[in-house]
Amino acid sequence: MRTLILGTFLCFASTLSATAYYVKQSGNDNLDGTSPETAWLSMQHAADVVQPGDIVLVGDGQYSGFDLRTSGTAQKPITFRADGESVIINQPNGKTNDGINIENADYVILEGFRVHDQPRNGIRLVLANHCTVRNCICTNNYERGIFTGFTDDLLLEHNTCSGSIDEHGIYVSNSSDRAIIRYNTCFNNNASGIQINADATQGGDGISSNPKIYGNILYGNGSAGGAAINLDGVQGAEIFNNLIYENHATGIALFTIDGGGPSTGASIY
């Protein structure tokens, strides 16, 4: 009985240790951030403070982005969530040329941000496993809407990525395994709508294994070449129920140029 009570208490104490923080355009980074009335001004301040299990709720308005280098855990991810329909990131985060940069940080969830006109990527995740990006809109960013590298067990869902000036809407790179890319809309990007390039020159085995790509809508991509779904060094891919139309180059392409091996074992249906 004592063991059961102690276990229950420890579980309850662990839950209590998570904190909800607030960010608003009218906030002040010198306050405690724990209520809408004491909200912080900047998402970067929140990124510097958060610990596993914390959630950051960002109110409508225009902001600079943020750079996060703290991991959550499987049971206690770190979450940044737009608390409104118009949370706009129109300035880079100040540490990289991206709107949002998640680096050396696992178990992070991003939800609902609108990121546009960034000098590199709208959202970038690198050396970041078990991360989720959902319901984000990335528009007119110079390189890509969403870019990831060395990101195992990634989930990208219900995002819209359009108008990337140089490259792709969504780009998953560098030996990232088991990505799930589903229910996204990618259109009018200069190159691919969705690109996976394992790229052996950057380290790792140069193979992206067992991604699932489904339920996406892809159109108007590839003015500079690149398929709507473009896979280099990708093995065991499952590609199904995507709507692909009016792209300027190939619909679905599987090949090897930079990858550590050929794209084999795909199911496309």
Image: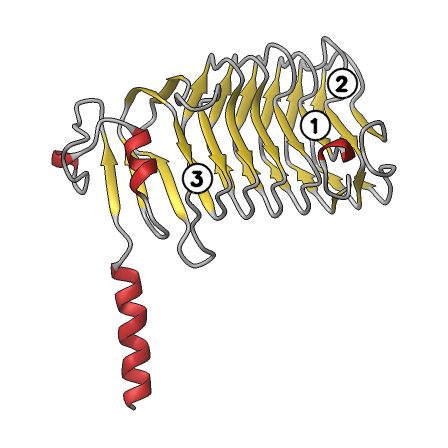
Secondary structure state at the residue bearing disc 3: loop
Q: Residue at x 48, y 48 (%)?
A: 107
Q: Residue at x 58, y 43 (%)?
A: 154
Secondary structure state at the residue bearing disc 1: strand
Secondary structure state at the residue bearing disc 2: loop
- The Cα atoms of the two marked residues, 1 and 3, are separated by 25 Å
Give the label on residue 195, or none. 1
Q: Position of residue 156 (x, y in %)?
A: 56, 37
Amino acid type shown at disc 2: Gly
In the image shown, does 34 or 216 lie closer to the viewer? Answer: 34
In the image shown, does 83 or 5 lie closer to the viewer? Answer: 5
Res 58 → quadrant: top left
Q: Position of residue 249 (x, y in %)?
A: 79, 14
Q: Is residue 3 above or below residue 9?
A: below
Pointer 3 residue: 69
In the shown orientation, is residue 19 left or right of residue 178? left
Name the N-terminal-most of marks 2 and 1. 1
Query: Quadrant where the C terminus lies?
Result: top right
Q: Is residue 40 above or below residue 204?
A: above
**Discs 1, 3 touching: Cβ within 8 Å:** no
Res 231 → quadrant: top right
Q: Crowding near pointer 3: few (<14 within 10 Å), some, many (20+)?
A: some
Q: Position of residue 186 (x, y in %)?
A: 61, 22
Give the label on residue 226, or none. 2
Name the N-terminal-most of marks 3 and 2. 3
- The Cα atoms of the two marked residues, 3 and 2, are separated by 32 Å
Q: Crowding near pointer 1: few (<14 within 10 Å), some, many (20+)?
A: many
Q: Which residue ends up furthest to the left in the rendered image?
A: 37
Amino acid type shown at disc 3: Arg
